[in-house]
Image (cartoon, grey):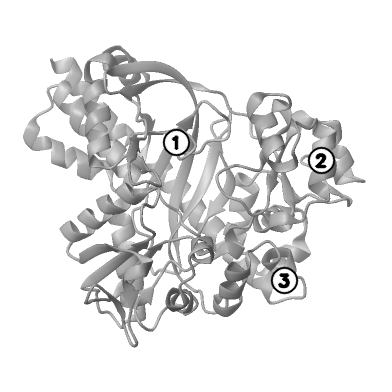
Amino acid sequence: MNELLEVLRFQAPKFGAELAQLAYQRGLAVTQKDGTTRPIPVTATAVILDAAEIRRRSELAARLSTAAMKMTEAVLNGGTRDVLLGALSPLERSIAERTWTHVTRLATTRVDYFVNAANQPRALEINTTIPAMQGYSDIAARTFLEVVARHFGYPEKAIHALLTLNGSNSLALYRALLDGYAAERKGKLPDTIALLCRRNDAQLTELRYLAERFREYGADADIVYPDEVSGDDAFMANGKKYDLVYRHLFVRRLEETPSPWLEDFLGTVPGTKAVFLNPPTSQMEVKTTWALLSQAVADPELAEGVGLSPDELEAIRTCVPWTRRFRRAPTTGPGGETLDDLVAAVAAEPKRFVLKRSWDYGGKAVFIGRSVGSVPYNERAQALYGAPLGWAELLERAVADSTGGGYVVQEVVETQPEDHFVCTETGALPTSFYVDYSAYASVGLAKQPAWGGVCRGSMSEIVNIVGGGGVLPLITTEVAHKLLMAWKAI
């Protein structure tokens, strides 16, 4: 749909301000610690994919998610559990040890891809602790479609059908929660849903958007804060009993402001006081798990021991870039070659590799070999190790650093920045963005809901919303065609 994108680039200055303002009003924003908000940039140019390709990426994410769960179960059930548990904070570890044998369902996971030059999605990592942005993605797509459709003269009464055709991650999340609840409560549905988060959470506006949608879909949903929660036999907040809890609260936040009641609640899966379908599963998200999945492709004994299915193995082989635990040891390289010492091999070819701390947030400990000496690289090295280290020096520090479970090394995924128009309150500006694609999935449900994806853009190769990135509307080819026909009919 290059023709539509050309039209959007030409027209962006005319509708960009309206798009930015409306998306911000609806909740496309980051909440600061003092409660104020700042807009998350949205683009006037969309990512356009066939609906079948969107489904395929979510199906791959589902297979990768079940594979990650199997891998963590195998590790925690064996003699090397510290490989994963050693990466976690004390409370994260305590909860993982109490719950991992009981986790059979995850309402939502998210696999983050970069799409390479051959247009193949390459899965960089998995999010299972708080796989957010269902609301952000819907705000971006919904607002884009409404503003552009009206600008193009699309019939007002037909816009709702256009939105329905494009799909909704908020609706998919709601259905996943209801399906999981029904499986736990013998077919019943929840009357009340609590969206649990800390006060002034960075994504508070997204949670408000989700709560509004959940009410529209039929459940009584509220945002609930840790200091409001209590109850001997039920999950109570402000005098109200909640049947189902959707957690948007990092366990480490409870270590900052301890809450024994919530710590006990999070340690009981799938919940007795309320059904709890997105428990903390840090052990799945630790990047060592991803490295072990990658290794399983080259190690049939490991794959068989974990119980990976042929479909799961094929998803790993197809999507997961070569990834290994970063340590002094022989291994097989990205091309299947024998590496006598992994550290030496990575030091010799920095342009081939990315170094990542196994358990960390926000890309703070991610180093791209080919960016050595750049300002972002130096700032990260300075923050972690007190100096802007060269590549070989960084590797020596990293291999001896066990914080967060040490590091993994991953083959770099070649991707190029794309030309987009970023909307502002006064119009739209041309920008060069690195764009990723995240696909949602569920684990342990009888049927996958109609998950879609979310696209983020950043001027940095390390894409992060809170760190200054933006959201690109994701629309289907069919919807894009309808918009283009409306434009041509003007």
Residue 269, how many percent across, how many down?
Answer: 46, 78
Residue annotated with mark 2: 395
Residue 232, how many percent across, how many down?
Answer: 34, 87
Residue annotated with mark 3: 81
* Residue that appears at 71% across and 45% down: 322
Decide if residue 169 is in sight here: no
Residue annotated with mark 1: 456
Quarter the C terminus occupies: top left
Three-letter residue code for mark 3 = Arg
Q: Earlier in the sequence, mark 2 or mark 1?
A: 2
Q: Secondary structure at mark 3?
A: loop
Three-letter residue code for mark 1 = Arg
Q: Are marks 1 and 3 in contact (CB under 8 Å)?
A: no
Foreground disc of the pair 2, 3: 2
Identify the residue at the far top of this view.
10
Q: Earlier in the sequence, mark 1 or mark 3?
A: 3
